[in-house]
């Protein structure tokens, strides 16, 4: 089962937490739960001050930065509550050597997590620490063997798992012709290009956070 020990934020303002995954952002005041992978990375283990959780928004400041960050639980792409979203990304427990999922990862996984990349052979836990959670509207169950991520609206990344390990990574981006997408598949180091049709996942009411 994939769980992180975490307690939902209460008694604001000013409570200290730590990020449990890398958090990607272009604008600090507009970090969508859709989790687009472009811009900058707030690293896993960053110490933050939580200010408030209200109106589908989580407001926090990384210690030492003085800049307000806001994660928005996006209505169109999220089927989970804001408190569950909070518990995915923040913990009262510090990320430190010799303790927790981060330091139980392999050396290769740790390097990929620091860089914010996904590679063949990574575990599901390592992928989440590197990339954050896949948008819930397309990956309603983390036990699925395919996770769907986005760089942008028409630029996607499909991650395929076998026995809890990544075995194929497919990036899908706009091709030169309107209405057609280009697929690049990275499987054990190889690359091929092809046209694909993306399957639509049925949104399930009972969202599963655990593996």
Image (cartoon, grey):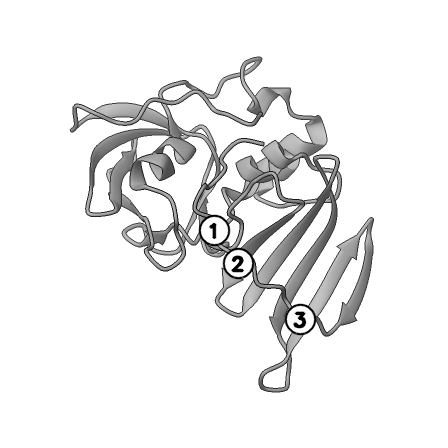
Q: Position of residue 122 (x, y in %)?
A: 69, 37
Q: Residue under label 3, please give it.
A: 197
Q: Work out which residue is located at the far bottom of the displayed protein and give it.
A: 177
Alpha carbon distance from label 1 to label 3: 19 Å
Residue drawn where x is 64% and y is 84% of the image: 176
Which numbered tag is attached to residue 150?
A: 2
Quarter of the figure with residue 42? top left
Q: Would you say 179 lies left or right of 19 here?
A: right
Q: Callout 1: helix, strand or loop?
A: loop
Vertical relation: 97 (above or below) 129? above
Q: Residue under label 1, please give it.
A: 135
Q: Nearer the viewer, mark 2 or mark 3?
A: 3
Instruction: Choose the circle earlier in sequence order: 1 or 3.
Output: 1
Quarter of the figure with residue 115? top right
Residue drawn where x is 72% and y is 74% of the image: 195
Quadrant of the drawing holding the C terminus: top right
Q: Disc 2 vs disc 1: Cβ atoms closer than 8 Å?
A: yes
């Amino acid at each position: 089962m994939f769980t992180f020990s975490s307690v939902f934020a209460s008694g604001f303002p000013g409570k200290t937490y730590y990020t449990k995954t890398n958090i990607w952002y272009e604008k600090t005041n507009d970090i969508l739960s859709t989790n687009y992978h472009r811009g900058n990375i707030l690293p896993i283990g960053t110490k933050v001050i939580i200010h408030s959780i209200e109106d589908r928004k989580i407001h926090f400041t990384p210690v030492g930065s003085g800049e307000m960050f806001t994660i928005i639980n996006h209505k169109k792409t999220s089927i989970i509550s804001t408190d569950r979203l909070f518990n995915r990304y923040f913990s009262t427990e510090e990320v430190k050597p010799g303790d927790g999922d981060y330091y139980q990862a392999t050396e290769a996984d740790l390097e990929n997590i620091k860089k914010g990349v996904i590679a063949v052979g990574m575990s599901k836990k390592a992928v989440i620490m590197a990339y954050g959670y896949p948008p819930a509207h397309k990956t309603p169950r983390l036990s699925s063997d395919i996770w769907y991520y986005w760089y942008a609206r028409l630029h996607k990344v499909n991650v395929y798992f076998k026995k809890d390990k990544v075995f194929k990574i497919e990036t899908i981006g706009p091709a030169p012709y309107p209405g057609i997408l280009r697929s690049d598949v990275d499987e054990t180091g190889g690359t091929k290009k092809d046209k694909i049709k993306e399957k639509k996942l049925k949104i399930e009411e009972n969202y599963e956070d655990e593996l």
